[in-house]
Amino acid sequence: MSVFDLIAENQIQDYNRRKANGEVKESRTIQPEERTSFESHLFKSIVGCYEKAAEKPEGERLALEERAESLRMQLLIGLEQKGMRITAQSMAKELMTKRQAILGGA
């Protein structure tokens, strides 16, 4: 794991600790940067598959959901291989939330 990955993981742990102690304001919005990581592109692609699947009839929906699951696994495995376990857990939870919000209980 690179030094930058270690720094990022430490910042995530610190943020989670501060959030648990009520030191973080949830209303603060974070502006995305122009450059995004490969993981960010995967995340957006997964959410895009969920959104497209929500618009399709049941028969066509399955292929998009399978594609989303394949991309999700690629994302989470890639993060795990980089040693970014906390980030992987966080993204897995966020993707589950987005899937439920977009597709419902499907």
Image (cartoon, rainbow, N blue to C red):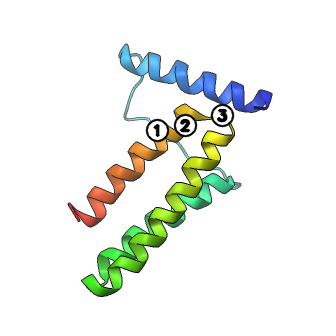
Question: Which quarter of the figure is the C terminus placed in?
Answer: bottom left
The amino acid pointed to by label 1 is: Ser
Real-space Cα separation, disc 3 to disc 2, in angstroms: 9 Å
The amino acid pointed to by label 2 is: Thr
- Could you classify mark 3 by the number of other residues whose Cα lies within 10 Å: few (under 14), some (14-19), or many (20 or more)? some
The amino acid pointed to by label 3 is: Gly
Q: Secondary structure at mark 1?
A: helix
Q: Residue at x 38, y 68 (%)?
A: 50
Residue 1 figure quarter: top right
> Does the CB distance between marks 2 and 1 fall below 8 Å?
yes
Q: Nearer the viewer, residue 94 or 19?
A: 94
Residue lying furthest top: 21
Say if 86 sits above or below 80 in the image: above
Query: Of the residues under marks 3 and 1, which one precedes in the sequence?
Result: 3
Q: Secondary structure at mark 2?
A: helix
Residue 18 in picture, x, y percent from top left: 45, 17
Q: Which residue is denoted by mark 1 in the rendering?
A: 90
Say if 69 sits above or below 84 in the image: below
- Could you classify mark 1 by the number of other residues whose Cα lies within 10 Å: few (under 14), some (14-19), or many (20 or more)? few
Q: Residue at x 41, y 16 (%)?
A: 23
**Labels 3, 1: front one:** 3
Mark seen at residue 87: 2
Q: How many marks?
A: 3
Say if 46 sits above or below 9 in the image: below
Residue lying furthest left: 105
Q: Which residue is denoted by mark 3 in the rendering?
A: 83
Q: Is residue 34 left or right of residue 77?
A: right
Q: Residue at x 79, y 27 (%)?
A: 3
Residue 34 figure quarter: bottom right
Residue 35 in picture, x, y percent from top left: 71, 54
Q: Is residue 16 left or right of residue 105?
A: right
Residue 24 in picture, x, y percent from top left: 42, 22
